[in-house]
Image (cartoon, coloured by chain):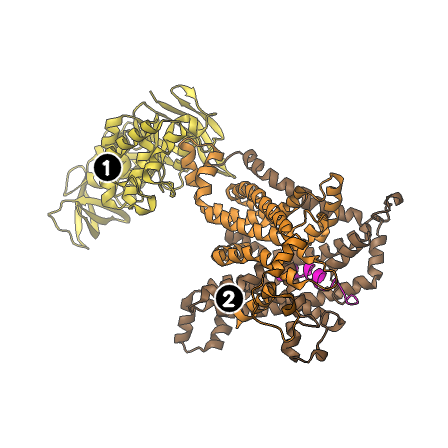
Amino acid sequence: MAVAFSLVPFFLFVSSAFKTQTQVTAIPPTLWPSFSLDFFHSAIVQYRILGYLLNSVIVAGATTFVTLFLATLAGYALARLPRSWAYFGLLVILACAMFPQIAIVGPVWRFLRLIGWLNTYQGLVLPYVALTLPLAVWILALFFREIPAELEAAALVDGCSRIGALVRIILPLSAPGLFTAAILTFIYAWNEFFLALLIITDPLRQTMPVGIALFQGEHTVPWGEIAAASFITTAPLVAMVLLFQRRIITGLSAGAIKG
Amino acid sequence: MIHADRKFYLALLAPTILVLLVFIAAPIAQSVVLSFHRIIVGLPQLQNPFIGIENYQELLHDSVARHSFLVTFVFVSVTTFCEVFLGLLLALLINHRFPGRGSLRACVLVPWAIPTVVSAQMWRFLFNDSYGLINYTLFGNEVSQYVAWLAKPGTALFTIILADVWKTTSFAALLILAGLQIIPDELYEAARVDGAGIWRRFRHITWPLIRPALLIALLFRTIDAFRVFDLAFVMTQGGPADATNVLQLYGYKKMFVEGWMGYGSAISVGVFIIILILAVIYVRMVGRRVLEANL
Amino acid sequence: MAFLILKNISKRFGGVPALSNVSLRVEDGEFCVLLGPSGCGKSTLLNIVAGLSPQDRGTILLDGESIDHLSPRERDMAMVFQSYALYPHMTVAQNLSFGLRMRGFSKEEMSLKVQETARLLQIEHLLDRKPRQLSGGQRQRVAMGRALVRRPTIFLLDEPLSNLDAQLRMSVRLELKSLHRQIATTILYVTHDQIEAMTLGEKVVVLRDGRVHQIGTPDTIYNRPADTFVATFVGSPMMNLFQGKIVCEGNAFKFRSPDFSLALGEVTLDMEDREVEVGIRPEDIAFGESEAVRLRAMVEMVSNVGTNKYVHAKLGKNAITVQAPKDVSYNVGESVALAMDPSKFHIFHEGKRIG
């Protein structure tokens, strides 16, 4: 029953992507699509969906990469610093994860306009990095804490530098944590709307969520194309979720519970 | 034990701190500063004078703002309650071992993973007044009976609430599930041996032990719900007649549509303070325990 | 050449002093044991020598040169950790060669050294396994191998045997000793087990609460303990200690405690009327009467520890433990006569040895 509730609405919507034009607006509604790819075609050709897709890939990918890099360093520092520091650091990071986007959107927009980074990839990626760092650092710090400090001691005595120990010993052992942080960061960046709406107004650079939200038809709402675009946007996510559900759940609960 | 220099660790933390400073801390501070000025984007010749707390005074008398707060408050209360309640049920369900549990979990996670705008469009489609499936389910082929859910002030808020509950219940369920799974099976078994039925077991074992998790889910969701934007923007654009004009949307309109950046900043600061209070409550109640458990 | 000198090493953690003015000298090729109860600072000292933790004060000299500013890598030491600290994601062979890899050895050289060390420790058949597939004893050997393979100037071992079961511990102890004879490298070995210290060490350093109590050969430590702590820490069962006063009777000195008196032998001290403690080891007490000492004790318990038998009795109000011959039986409640040889007494004043 719960499954039905979760999936049915979505399925219905998405199946519209595969219908013909008349089927979409018909009453009674046709439950099963006729698997026509018309809408995909028009979505790609008329509405340039693939452009949006590419932008999303670039932005989400870059965000994940940068966030993970910075979070690894920061998480390691917080994991190895004496308790009081780590406490403080994590508290600050928790705080950063709780404010409303609107409190930063205005000034960030003005700042980006000032340095000419509106409508650029980096202009969106950097705020995203700031927004995804808290959770990523938290997850990685927790994972790194699990690794006994003696392993690093052994590596140091064996002749490693500190960074070397981080790269050769700690990272391989925290692969699951890195993976989880990466997935969560990617999903967040992929789905984000508010900032993307404001920072990038050039349709050539807009990301998928913005594209889908602002879908304008000529006379009517182009549901078919919207459905097609939604399908393209969410297919990779759904695949990721189904494949990595265990990791995702661990990461999310680590971010909140563990109490 | 082995301590590297403080300097080394600080160097590792520096880039992160820098990013957070520039894109979060500074902007928040800047918002506060801006809220004390009159700034109209597009009219730079006014030179953004400092006007003290005028924006705030105006805010307090702004009926739209008050209405917006009310709308948001209703939204937060209803969604949080529903999500935690349903989430609890869902978590209890998933906690039972049964075949196909894994796929149920995955399915439940799907709504969470979908971009909010996609789910917003989806619900827009389903609530459509000409061919939406909701209307069809309720009224069959009687097209004349179809309700324009999104266009009536009475029902518009309801649609957004439903959309949010659909999307986020699973997240709440996961948080609660994590708390459920910590409860050792032996407690239930002992209770069963003692003759306690399902309700008794729930009341005396599950409920007290799950309260912290529920609290966390509650507070998390409350703070998150206050930040609603995507759904209102895509589904109703804040209408009809401000029925769904949630706080962040109102602030957005003032700042970026009408260009009143100073006033809009006052709104953002207001929202920020509300959430700050909630966050402080959160950290007070649960933060210490969570951190200590982890460190 | 690798002789190590520690001068006045001190370290605090927060407000708590972990080490206070520790000074010692380890000769080239010497097997030096740091012995002490948990929390005495011996592991901290080892970490400082390795360069993992900086000392607050004091200096470390290797072959006469200060190494305080050198990183662990530059100090060319090898360490075996109590928990072994094997890299879980690498095979045994990779674990062994890690240190060599860090120092830029060629593939052939590494392979050669790894094989050699594996042969020495009899772990050749384990080279392709991962640590989680090994038993405790095997892991211990790999940890030792990792240290050995680099032929460092100094070996540091932090309670390497404490996680092994008793039998394994015995055999590994013997192996360690023979290994030391073969490779003749300077070793700094940390343990809380005094039997280990006594059997392995050429020089024993007794530590407590961050301070050095005595440095000496096992013989010296055992037969001439510098204070009551060393006297009671080393030797099992514990040395018997009695409190009392020294009095002068005629031209002989006697030790008088509330319940009994002991005639002291050649005592050249200026200790008349002073409060002292007299100690004697269980194996130095005999049953039977003698002209020198006449004591009667009440048997409370007899313990049979395999190789030895001990009688726990009460001498007045004092507890006393005596090593007993195996073939004689003693019954609880029985009154026995004890004789002590004054030359075996250890006399302490305010904790420190005076005779």
Say which chain tag 1 marks. C
Q: Which percent across, then down, holds residue B33?
A: 78, 46
Q: Is residue B238 magenta?
A: yes
Q: Quadrant of the N terminus of chain C?
A: top left
Is C272 drawn above or below residue A254 in the view shown?
Answer: above
Question: Crowdedness of circle 2 by 10 Å Cα count: few (<14), some, many (20+)?
Answer: some
Image hue for chain B: brown
Is C294 drawn above or below residue A237 in the view shown?
Answer: above
Residue extending farthest to the left is: C327
Is A3 drawn above or below residue A63 in the view shown?
Answer: below
In the displayed structure, does residue B57 sit left or right of residue B87? Answer: right
Q: Which percent across, then down, holds residue A172?
A: 44, 42
Q: Gap in Å between the C-alphas at discs 2 and 1?
A: 53 Å
Q: Check disc 2 and report the residue beneath it.
A: B209
In front: label 2 or label 1: 1
**Badge number at residue C318:** none
Q: Is residue B283 magenta?
A: no
Q: Quadrant of residue C100?
A: top left
Image hue for chain C: yellow
Which type of secondary structure does the marked residue at label 2 adopt? helix
| Residue type, label 1 | Gln
Q: A7 or A14, which lies in front?
A: A14
Q: Residue at x 75, y 72 (%)?
A: B152
Q: Check disc 1 and report the residue beneath it.
A: C122
Image hue for chain A: orange
Tell me the magenta residue range.
Answer: B221-242
Say which chain tag 2 marks. B
